[in-house]
Every structure is written in C-alpha cells, then in structure tokens.
Image: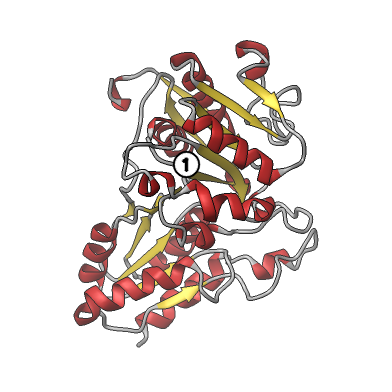
Amino acid sequence: MTATAQKMKTMTMVAAINNALDLALARDPDVCIFGEDVGVMGGVFRATDGLQQKHGVERVFDTPLAEAAIVGMGIGMGLAGLKPIAEIQFAGFLYPALDQILSHLGRYRHRTRSRYHLPMVVRAPYGGGVHTPEQHADSPEAILAHTPGVKVVIPSTPGDAKGLLLAAIADPDPVFFFESIKLYRSTKEEVPEDYYTLPIGKARVVTQGDDVTVICYGGMVEVAQKAAEAARNAGIGVEIIDLRTLVPLDLDTVLASVEKTGRAVIVTEAPRTAGFHSEIAANIAEEAIDFLQAPIVRVTGFDAPYPPFTAIEDVYRPNPLRVAKAIKKVMSH
C-alpha cells in the first residue's frame, strides 16, 4: 500500500518512530529491540514506550551500559537470522563500540562473498538544540559514513522517520539511523498510520529555487528553511536539498540542483574538519565545477567538543543567521 492511500494521523517524530517499531515487531517475529532503558522505561525519549508491555520482554529488553556489547550482541543476533534493532542512548556514546563497528559490522557481506548478510539497525539520537550534557549532542555521522559496508540514514520529518526506519529494518545490510534530538517533539505532521517504506538513498527537494542550493539533513533542515524564508524576502530563490541518507548518497539530486542554481551552501552541525559536508563539497567540485558561479560555502559546528548545557550551544550550533550570511556570501561573489 502506498503512503498516499493510507489513513493519516498527526505525529511527532518520536511518535512516528515508536509507531514504526511497533509495526515492525508485529509484522516480523525475528525483529527485536534492545538497549539501555528501552524496555521498562521506554527509552530516555520514550521512543520505545509501551513496546515491551505489548510485545514481551524477550523481544524488547534492557541491556547493561555497555555499547560495545550492545553492538557486538546485535552482530551475533543478525548473523543468527534475527533482525536486531539496537538503541544507543545517545550517538556520542557510540565510541566504545567503534571496534565492533569498524572491524566487524560492515564487513560480513564482503568476508563471505555475499553468502551472509547482517540485517541490523543501530538507532541513536544525535545533535544539539536542547542543552544536553557533554557527549549527548555529538554528530559522529562522518565516522560511520567512512565505514564501508554500512548505510547511514538521518531523517528530518516524522513521515520520513517512519518510512525510512521501516526500510532500514527491512534492509539486508546494517543501517545506522540517527534521530535529531531537537526534532523529536518540535515538529508534527500527518503520517500514514499503516506500514510503508521510503527508498534509502533518495534525497528530498524541500523547496524549489533558482539562485542557490542549500544542502543539509536532519536537524539542520529546519534551520535552512528559516534562512531560506529570510532569503526569499530579499528576492533570493533558495532550493533546499534534504539528503535524508548519507550512505548511499543521492548525488544526482544534489548535482542537478547545483547545476541549476550555480551556487552551493552546505549545512551540518558536526565539527568542521573532515565532516561529511567536506565529502559533499568534494563531489560537487569534481562533478559540477563548470556550473559553479561562486565557491562552495560550508556552515558547520566548530573543531571543539560540543558545549554542554550552556547558551554557548546557540553559538556552536548553526543557526538561521549563519546560514543566511552564507547565502548572502555566495550570492555576492
């Protein structure tokens, strides 16, 4: 059934994620969910609220505070034929699991010459905007995008979150699914109630424009939209591309937009050096240099740990004013 043919319901992003997980558990007995506080508590953001009570402790269960063990156990479960969904409480807690991720998670299809797949989803809230403590607002997506064999999905709307999460669960290969903390409850929209999927690897054109392309994903999409509104008031047409998926990257949609506008601004909240924004910029420079009318401009976080708690976060995290200044810069070149 297509999404447009279904009955709709207004959902926040966290409600849409909960709904997707509920549907996946009901649809496939091999699906199981585990992580820190996902069972009895229902997750720190309540993304798994009620799922243990509905589907049982054998399919939705709590783990110790041990990220390497969580990912490692999921690898074994996936190879044994289950479809594990591991929640890492915050993306900044992934680092103890990097050995499992870099050495094992993405390699099994290659190791076995495609005789074995590893259908595993690793969910994690990421990014800032709500004044969290240290390591609770990190954006480590570039580390994962640099890891061969895994996919990286970062939705920006409730409807995309549900459809892409269900697609990730159905995918035969490991998928990292990052959820913007800022967007969990700050946005609502009509979402199909029943099961549906969206294609992994297809970007979304959020707004049409002829003057400048703004490329972003996750929590930066709403920031770009506010900057684009200000630009439109100044007579500048902004085309916003929401990547939705970093790996695989929908480069065709990005290049088509840049070839039309001749200008590109890339917005992410990760640190500047070696971030995924650099990969996007390099691809544009390699494939669309003849169309560019101005240098590519990046709006990012800074090369420092994400600031905990304080209002300094509002300076570190890209905001509409910084994006608007970048748009003005490429337009004035």
Q: Residue 97, image x and y in percent?
A: 64, 50
Relative vertical location of residue 285 with respect to residue 135 in this rendering, above or below? below
Query: Does residue 185 show up?
Result: no
Q: Residue at x 39, y 21 (%)?
A: 195
Closer to the camera in the image, 159 or 153? 153
Circle 1 Cα neighbour tier, 10 Å, few/some/many (<14 / 14–19 / ≥20): many
Query: Does residue 327 show up?
Result: yes
Closer to the camera in the image, 111 or 30? 111
Colouring used for the render = secondary structure
Q: Residue at x 35, y 80 (%)?
A: 331
Closer to the camera in the image, 172 or 4? 172
Q: Residue at x 66, y 56 (%)?
A: 95
- In this figure, which residue is indicated by the disc labeled 1? 157
Tell whether 221 sits left or right of 72.
left
**Disc 1 residue type (three-letter):** Thr
Relative vertical location of residue 322 with respect to residue 313 in this rendering, above or below? below
Q: Residue 75, image x and y in percent?
A: 54, 38
Quarter of the picture containing the N terminus is: top left
Considering the numbered disc 1 on the image, is that residue within a helix, a strand or a loop? loop
Q: Residue furthest bottom?
A: 333
Closer to the camera in the image, 286 or 131? 286
Q: Residue at x 26, y 77 (%)?
A: 286
Q: Residue 269, image x and y in percent?
A: 57, 64
Relative vertical location of residue 19 with respect to residue 249 in this rendering, above or below? above
Quarter of the picture containing the C terminus is: bottom left
Q: Residue 68, image x and y in percent?
A: 67, 46
Tell whether 191 sits left or right of 307.
left
